[in-house]
Image (cartoon, grey):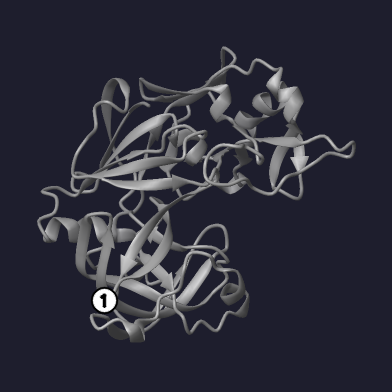
Amino acid sequence: EIIIDNYLTYYVSNIKLGTPAQDITVIVDTGSSDLWVVSSDTTSSEVFCSVFGGMFNSSDSVTFHSNDTYFYDYYSDGTTASGTWGYDVVQINDIVAYNLSFGLANNTNQDGNAILGLGLMELEATDANISQTDFEDYTYFNLPQKLVELGVISRNVYSLFLNNQYSYSGSILFGAVDYTKFIGDLTTHPLTSTEEFMIALSGISFNGENLGTENAVYDALFDCGNTAITIPASIAKPILEYTNSTYNNDSGLYAQTCSYLSELNIPDLIFDFQGATIRVPQNELIIDPQNPYGNGQQEAFYDSEGRALCFIAIQIQEEDEDDLIIVGDYFLRSCYTIFDLDNKELSIAQA
């Protein structure tokens, strides 16, 4: 089991990389599959000034080996990273992975932490060939599969428990299930994608009303690297109207004063996964940037009268992707999730 620290809009883990070990902080992400870290010889000056997750000096590690092949990765939020592929020993708590492949980025626009992708091997940058190089596509053993190869776990499966937004940490349990972390029964759902953790979602309801198109079936992407719940406008509209929220350009989210929302009784947002339901309560649907709990407050926002703003943890999906729903941290805190990479399925229960 590894502990992941809650920074309200993302979760991080501390890893040790190389010999002797160097401390690196990584954002945990089920929506991607590669581990990459920032190189100490980065050419990105803004990253050098602002990165707080630590940089890796490959010259100081006697166990580092470079593949001398080009590394490039990009993400839906516009984050990019490029450099070279290499491998070294990685330790997370008491878990040790020898000769784990990772990207060593000397150029990135990510101004925070490196990223630890825990997705399917089919989503690895080497297989998707997003670098558009002349190399033939291939997959490699990323962290979950490497733990199987090394005999640390017997099956390529892990469980994600984010805890609530007021907690300092959540956890990832490799190779096992913690039955104390959820209520009710686990239900198992086959993936609807060969590359990503998507399962079928048959509906969302709010305040006694079924939202969206009748009889529609959506693909729900389980992505802890995303903060909010991304849904089509037709589903979001009744929720935003109920909370009387308006779009805030600075944050990219829908805002209302914290005082107004604290006095409002917001019904649960209910997700129906073909008969299995997950309820997201009011306290997990509102982002308070000045939340005094967890590991650090975010940037504060105020309206024209100086009142503190909170945000609804919902983003509007692009019109050409109306059949895709992304369930980020503000959903996943209410859902205990087992990622079975061997059988290509997810098991879920109310956390």
Which is nearer the eye, 344 or 112?
Answer: 112
Q: Position of residue 174 (x, y in %)?
A: 23, 46
Up/down of 157 relative to 123, above or below: above
> Residue shown at 26%/40% (left/top)?
345
User: Is 23 left, or right, of 279 in this rendering?
Assistant: left
- What is the tally of numbered marks visible in this picture? 1
Q: In the image, what residue occupies the spot 51% across and 35% down?
A: 165
Q: Residue furthest front?
A: 20
Judge whether residue 311 can be spotted in this image: yes
Residue 229 against residue 105 in the figure, above or below:
above
Position of residue 15 measured from the top left corner of the image (x, y, whole percent): 34, 61
User: Residue 194: where, in percent of width, then height?
Assistant: 30, 51
Residue at x-position 84% and y-position 39%: 303
From the top left corner, tell me how far across and down residue 19 is, in percent: 26, 76
Quick check: 196 above or below 294?
Answer: below
Identify the element where label 1 is drawn.
Answer: loop
**What amino acid type is highlighted by mark number 1?**
Thr
Closest to the observer, 5 or 240: 5
Judging by the rendered image, the residue that carries numbered circle 1 is 19
Q: Residue furthest right?
A: 305
Image quarter (top left, top right, bottom left or bottom right) of the C terminus = top left
Q: Is residue 303 left or right of residue 76?
A: right
Task: Give the residue displayed 57% in from the left and 76% down from the top.
Answer: 48
Q: Residue furthest top?
A: 208
User: Quick check: can you spot residue 327?
Assistant: no
